[in-house]
Image: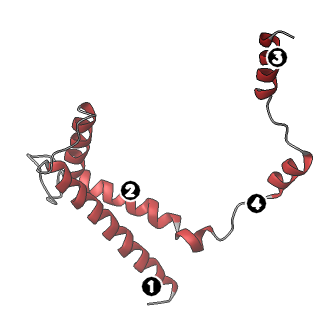
Amino acid sequence: RPASVASRSSVRSAVRPARLSRSMVARASAEKFDTGYEQKFGNAWILHGGLAMWSAVVCTPIVPLVNYQGEPLGIAFMHSIFRLMDQFPTGPKIDDPFWLQLIVWHFGLFTVLTLGTIGVQGKKQNY
């Protein structure tokens, strides 16, 4: 046999898709969604509600949270992200206002999520 014929047959066997056995398919279809999701990760309403409320607060120009050149924090933070994406290979410098916006935005978000979790757990325990 010529070398080219042997190499073609080995390539064909290497690219064949793997076949799933019936037991593998049955096992995958029998697995169900984890019902302890809320116990592990917390109430999804707190996460979504907290993110929506915090985003609404920081993107409203009426709230004088941290005002960057007439823009609310959320809008200024998004503008910083887009500006930094334009200069992609080069990262932000240490004195870039992006870092302060990043820290303030996330600190506020995690504070809202923590207070929301405390409120929901307190209501469940009748406080």
The percent coordinates of residue 47 (x first, y second) are 45, 63
Residue type at mark 4: give it: Lys
- For marks 3 and 4, give the CA distance: 46 Å
Q: What residue would you read off at disc 4?
A: 32
Q: Nearer the viewer, mark 3 or mark 4?
A: 3
Left or right of 118? Residue 38 is right
Q: Quadrant of the C terminus?
A: bottom left
Residue type at mark 2: give it: Ala
Q: What residue would you read off at disc 1?
A: 122
Q: Secondary structure at mark 3?
A: helix
Q: Are marks 1 and 4 in contact (CB under 8 Å)?
A: no
Mark 3 closeness class: few <14, some 14–19, many ≥20 residues within 10 Å:
few
In this rendered view, identify the residue nearer to me: 1 or 57.
1
Residue type at mark 1: give it: Gly
Report the disc number at residue 6: 3
Up/down of 122 relative to 5, above or below: below
Answer with mark 1 or mark 3, whichever residue precedes in sequence. Answer: 3
Q: Nearer the viewer, mark 1 or mark 3?
A: 3
Q: What residue would you read off at disc 2?
A: 52
